[in-house]
Image (spheres, rainbow, N blue to C red):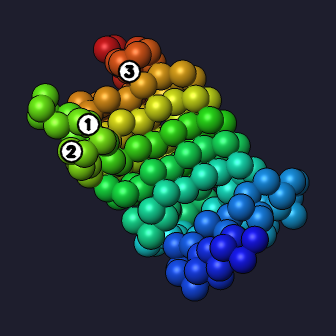
């Protein structure tokens, strides 16, 4: 029992440990009150935080001090943001429920060394202004999603070029439409 208490004290002395303990307490607090509590305290730990951030229930963070979130963003229910390589969310980004964004992955090139001993590769993720990622979208490290894109539910975004204002879907995601109105005569 003393060992557990000692670990809790140790966690509270470390900034990352304090953040993790705090999140464990408030992560699932329901309703508007929960959103208000999370919006007031959790963004303090971000690398950068805009105004009017909504953090829904169950959002999990790793390496939160490398996360940049713009104005009027909504982090959806049960999102998981692994920001070890850096994640930037522009203004007015909406993440649907279950979205996962990864900016770190295991190295696996050396066949003679177990994967869990090869270290990690960090690759920053950027989600542009006004993007909406639907439910259960997975974003791989290194993705750069330009402004105005909509990603359909269940899609997987790989590291490749996507045009602004695209509608994306699939596994891996590809352009399935465009949000820009068609010009007269075109």
Q: Quadrant of the C terminus?
A: top left
Q: Are marks 2 and 3 in contact (CB under 8 Å)?
A: no
- In depth, the one of 55 and 60 nearer the eye is 60
Q: Which label number is shown at residue 118?
A: 2
Determine crowd level at label 1: few under 14, some 14-19, many 20+ residues with C-alpha closer than 10 A. Answer: some
The answer to whether residue 70 is seen in the rendering is: yes
Per the image, label 1 sits on a secondary structure element best described as helix
Q: Residue at x 25, y 45 (%)?
A: 117
Q: Residue 68: give x, y in percent of width and height.
A: 44, 64
Residue beneath disc 3: 173
Determine crowd level at label 3: few under 14, some 14-19, many 20+ residues with C-alpha closer than 10 A. Answer: many
Q: Residue 160: give x, y in percent of width and height.
A: 24, 31
Q: Are marks 1 and 3 in contact (CB under 8 Å)?
A: no
Classify residue 68 as left or right of residue 143: right
Q: Residue at x 61, y 29 (%)?
A: 135
Classify residue 131 as left or right of residue 6: left
Instruction: Answer with mark 2 or mark 3, whichever residue precedes in sequence.
Output: 2
Q: Residue 154: give x, y in percent of width and height.
A: 54, 21
Gap in angstroms between the C-alphas marked 1 and 2 = 5 Å
Residue beneath disc 1: 115
Q: Are marks 1 and 2 in contact (CB under 8 Å)?
A: yes
Determine crowd level at label 2: few under 14, some 14-19, many 20+ residues with C-alpha closer than 10 A. Answer: some
Q: Quadrant of the N terminus?
A: bottom right
- In depth, the one of 144 and 124 nearer the eye is 124
Gap in angstroms between the C-alphas marked 2 and 3 = 28 Å
Q: Which label number is shown at residue 137?
A: none
The answer to whether residue 123 is seen in the rendering is: no
Classify residue 11 as left or right of residue 159: right
Q: Nearer the viewer, mark 1 or mark 3?
A: 1
The part of the image, by quadrant, that contains residue 3 is bottom right
Please determine whether, in this image, residue 92 is positioned above or below residue 184: below
């Amino acid at each position: 029992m003393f060992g557990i208490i000692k670990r809790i004290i140790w966690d509270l002395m470390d900034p990352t440990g304090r953040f993790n303990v705090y999140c464990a307490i408030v992560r699932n607090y329901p309703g508007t009150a929960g959103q208000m509590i999370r919006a007031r305290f959790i963004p303090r730990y971000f690398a950068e935080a805009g105004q009017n951030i909504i953090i829904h229930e169950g959002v999990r963070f790793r390496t939160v001090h490398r996360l940049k979130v713009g104005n009027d963003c909504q982090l959806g229910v049960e999102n998981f943001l692994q920001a070890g390589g850096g994640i930037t969310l522009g203004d007015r980004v909406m993440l649907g429920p279950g979205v996962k964004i990864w900016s770190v992955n295991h190295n696996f090139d050396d066949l003679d060394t177990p994967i869990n001993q090869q270290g990690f590769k960090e690759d920053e993720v950027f989600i542009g202004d006004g993007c909406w990622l639907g439910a259960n979208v997975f974003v791989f490290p290194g993705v750069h999603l330009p402004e105005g894109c909509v990603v359909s539910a269940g899609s997987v975004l790989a590291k490749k070029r996507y045009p602004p204002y695209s509608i994306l879907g699939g596994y891996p995601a590809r352009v399935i439409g465009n949000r820009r109105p068609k010009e007269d005569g075109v």
